[in-house]
Image (spheres, rainbow, N blue to C red):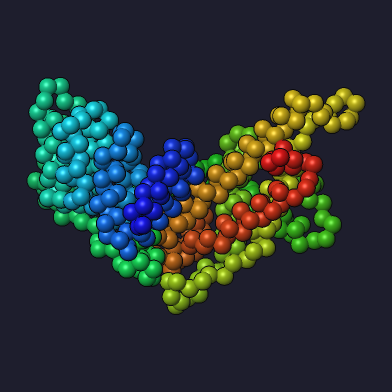
Amino acid sequence: VALSIAGSVFKRMYEQAAAVGTAARLATQVNVSVIARIHSVCKKVGQFVADMLIYADDERKLHEEIVLSLLLAQVVTMTDLSPRLAKHLSANRSAHSIAFCAWLVRRTMLDEPLVAATEAKELLGALAAIAQQPTPSEGLLRLLDDLRAALAGGGAQGGRLPKPPPPGTAAAVATGLGGGAPPPHGYARGPPPEPHDPALARAREQLAPLWAEWLGLCSQQGANERGFVNQLQTAGWLRRDEHGDRFLRVMTELAISAAHTDGVVAGAADTAKPPLAMATLDAYSKLVVLLLKALTPEPTPSGARDMSPSALAATAKAQLGLLTKVLGVLITHLLRSHALTAAHGIAAAAAQHRQDPVGSPPPFNQRSYLRLFGNWLTDLSAPDPSLDTLQPQ
């Protein structure tokens, strides 16, 4: 039964990974987490997944992010993969297979040493044999030279993945191991620091008072909320360009940071439940709905709304495009916050956010994102002629 369930999740993971963007990455992490949980109660799942990774019908199974995530979650090990990949290369020396194996060696032994050279001896031998063939790729030769230099210097030989803690423990939650979703690609030691963006820094300074003004309007009865949207439109914040993208990103950051009033209580355990100010999240979700409603067909010369099929289609496209951007920004924030907390633990993530509230997201709290998604699901499904284009018929 466990193998059957793992096989179904494995198949679904590759189907969802075929999409592009942050949603595909999030789906991969969720599916790997599920497989890791199954593996914690049935160790045969590791060998089963390793076989499926290598001996599938096509080469799409050699998916970089999926294989690395499974390694980080310790569903599979390099000791399992190495002989299978070596056997695969002996029968199939396609450019894709060689490139994948070379990438895996560089990623796990040079970029961030995760495995010992002795664990990948079969794979390294197969790559060395390919390098002896006529016209080997420059990338493969360079990899082997870099690996020899690292081994000679004492590097790339002792790195090993730590033994995963028992699933469900505080250590497992904090590290992302032991059945939890591993950090996204490149986040094994926490999310990388963001490069300084002067335009984004200016946007944060300019939007902070506007966010405070919006919160004040939401607390008043009969406030001119549409006037605030017109103010944003006049200032150019709602343009469909990088200016508008920065607006969505900064407003998302401000809403979620404001919801995490004080992070966690000093001295509390890593698993302490941080307080959450739902009113700020409700205010942001309300603003997004108003922005979507503001995207209505332009008036005709007579002053009436243009309700022609082409105008309605343009409105639907604009509303769907804005909603897609909003969700993309929120998912990106979710992934970054989760990776930070998984790498450092809730308490450490909260401390880092207090020191740098702009550059680092608050500790991951799924309730923030659930609140926003739930609000939009409810509000956008309510009967409203201005939102009919977003509602399934």
Say if residue 191 shows up in the picture: no
49 displayed left or right of 19: left
Residue 386 lies in quadrant: top right
- Residue found at the far front of this picture: 1
Q: Position of residue 47 (x, y in %)?
A: 25, 52
- Measured as percent of width and height from the top left, residue 85 is found at 20, 40
Which corner quadrant holds the C terminus? top right
Judge left or right: residue 323 versus residue 223.
left
Compared with 185, 337 (above or below) is: below
**Residue found at the far right of this picture:** 302
Q: Which residue corresponds to the image point at 40% horizontal and 49% vertical from the top-left?
A: 9
Give 80 or 1, whichever is nearer the viewer: 1
Q: Looking at the picture, tell me which residue is in the foreground, 1 or 345.
A: 1
- Find the residue positioned furthest to the bottom: 267
Q: Position of residue 260 (x, y in %)?
A: 56, 64
Q: How many marks?
A: 0
Note whether 313 is above or below 151 in the view shown. above
Q: Can residue 246 be seen in the rendering of this structure? A: yes
Q: Would you identify the image quadrant in which residue 319 lies?
A: top right
Question: Which residue is outermost to the top?
Answer: 135
Q: Quadrant of residue 144?
A: top left
- Given residues 347 and 211, the one toward you in this image is 347
Where is residue 166 shown, x and y percent of the image? 32, 68
User: Looking at the image, which is closer to me, 170 or 288?
Assistant: 170
- Seen at 34% across and 35% down, the residue is 60
Q: Quadrant of the N terminus?
A: bottom left
Residue drawn at x 58%, y 46% as measured from the top left:
327
Q: Is residue 170 above or below residue 280?
A: below
Residue at point 58%, 58% (across, down): 370
Q: Is residue 264 left or right of residue 379?
A: left
